[in-house]
Amino acid sequence: MQPHIHVAIDPELGNQPTAPTGIAPATAGRPRRRFSRLVPNTVLILSGLFFVAPLLTLARFSLQNVPTILLGWNTLFDKWSLNGLTKAFDDPAFWPALKLSLQLAVGTVVLTLGLLLPTAIWTHLRVPKARSVIEFMTVLPYMIPAIALVAGIKIIQPHARWFLNSDFSLIPFYVILALPFTYRSLDAGLKAIDLRTLVDASRSLGAGWGSTVFRVVIPNLRTAIISASFLTAAVVIGEFTIADTLLKETLPRFQATFVGREPQGGYGLNLLALIVTIGLFVTLSVLTKKRDPKRKSFARQAANAALVEKPGQL
Amino acid sequence: MTNLTFVSVRKTFGPTVALEGLDLDVKPGELISLLGPSGCGKTTALRIAAGFEFADSGAVLVSNADITRTPAHKRNMGMVFQSYSLFPNLTVANNVDFGLRTRKMASAERHRRVAEMLELVQLTHLADRYPHQISGGQAQRVALARALAVQPSVLLLDEPLSALDAKVRSTLRDEIRRIQTELGITTLFVTHDQEEALAISDRIGVMSNGRLEQLGTPRDVYRHPSSAFVARFVGSMNELPATVVGNHAVNVGGHPVVVHQTSQDDGTAVRLLVRPEDMKVVDDGGLHGTVTTCTFQGSSTILGVRLDIVDVLTSVHVAGIADLNPGERVQVAIDGSRAVCEPMS
């Protein structure tokens, strides 16, 4: 039988026995800890600069009425103006393009959720083995570039003008492009809840399939659905290749032409789009955390009813 | 008051037979536990009763009405699940209200019923909370209140205590039994925990490989197991090699033991299954052995004894505190009146 050995463990150094050097473990750990924090902090700062620096230069170009050649440290605080952000609003093509892109975004979100939500729920409940196949199919748009899709559209274009002439013919293509984001988001949401038990519980309480989906599944997938919708909208509002091929006057196509005519206004519009997107994602995170206050009112009434029946209980 | 009847119910999943001709009648107001190891078909039976699965053949009747093909939402069954099945987006009160809303009950009546149910499970003060704000035990009590709120004809409990810690499990087990008795609701309870089944059931159905091995009162199942499987599964068993001597006796290491009955011929080698409480430490005339372990369990002590002649490690139940230590020599007597003889394979 082996004798019992007691070994001191230093939590800072992990599960390694401390060497009997006489050095206090806490003092030995400090420089190492500092160094271990330095590396990730440096990487974080460099990454931040990598993303922020181009945006700052974009902001200067769009919002400073200073010729590009003169943009430097000595003109850092000269002639700032918000005009650059709103120049595009005066262009007669801007509002129709924005309207079309928003309509396409709404249409794509509705069609995507309409197709994928039942598919994802059904797959999780009835054919879980098919999940990997569906997951593979939904990532295909990642692997097949949009230009390949465009080549396909070009081939069928002469035979399907009745369909492709409509501005809304872009929606099915955008559904395909948004598949990887939408399906993954919904799939993650479904994995996070005990779907089978919730559905069984709902059905055992007398709810049919429709009621179960709308009263139990969808409310518990709210975060996933909102995320999927925002990601889909982001794909639609940023998509250029297919819209350009089919000559649809969407916002990205307007941006591409407008930046040629009016560089400062064009980049200002890009900056504005970025600010709006950030704003939307902040709204998204707030929305997904908020609880419905109406839900509580019933609970209070039930508690009050209990109080009336048994005063002094609570 | 309703009864739930399974008539020769068979269910397969691909090549696996989950249920093989299950016949069971849960009488009005009765609580029957289906007890068995994982994969024995007990949960399948419950899911067939609930309408989540349909039987391949046979029938399920509620008060003699055939519900074999009735969809789950039209069966009026109350069910409590193993995992916490509360709807995370609804408060405790709204969870209890869910089934009532589905039945389009008037608002005032719903409020009254929800209050009544929360009172029944003593959780009125948590009506406002969301499921993530309450403990596991409380969640299962809410699930019970929710299942009972719709006044189901049958209550189905699918291992509702298995995710809880020992103390909460024991309290909630008693509470389930209290509520079930108070409401007189016909209940089918599925569990793999024999202690749970023995504690709260009117009758226990022990299942193995999709078949009902034995159905009887907890006392019957424990005291008179119909097969070696039941004997082993319900309670703990000592297994001693023996030889048949006549119709009512076996020989264990040279010591004759009187048994209830043996169906084997004289001289046949058998395995004698004896409960620890049917083995006693005696001063004289028992099988000699050495104490290997001594486990104090509060009201009793379990001794591990290695018998000399048959070289088998047995456990012996001793009431109170046994004044014995590992290494001590003892003699053990066997009361074979409730033992089961199983042919040696």
Image (spheres, rainbow, N blue to C red):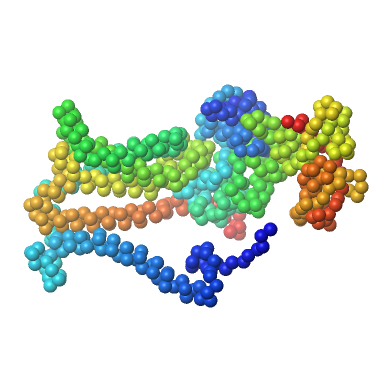
Query: Which x, y percent locates residue A199?
Result: 48, 39
Q: Is residue B113 visible?
A: no
The picture places residue B117, in percent across and down from the top left corner, at 58, 47
In the picture, measured across the screen, residue A75 lies left or right of residue B178, that is: left
- Looking at this view, name the residue that lies furthest to the right: B284
Residue A34 versus residue A173 in the image, above or below: below
Quadrant where the N terminus of chain A is found in the figure: bottom right
Residue at the (11%, 48%) spot, across then down: A257
At horizontal 56% and vertical 54% (from top left) the residue drawn is B135
Residue visible at 52% across and 49% down in the picture? B93
- Give the quarter of the figure containing the C terminus of chain A: bottom right
Q: Position of A197 compared to B58: left or right?
A: left
Closer to the camera, B101 or A8? A8
Q: How many labels does the image show?
A: 0
Does the rendering let one see residue B311? yes
Query: Where does the image place residue B257, in percent across and percent down from the top left?
Result: 87, 37
Residue under the point 83% across and 48% down: B289
- Horizontal and vertical percent for residue B268? 81, 29
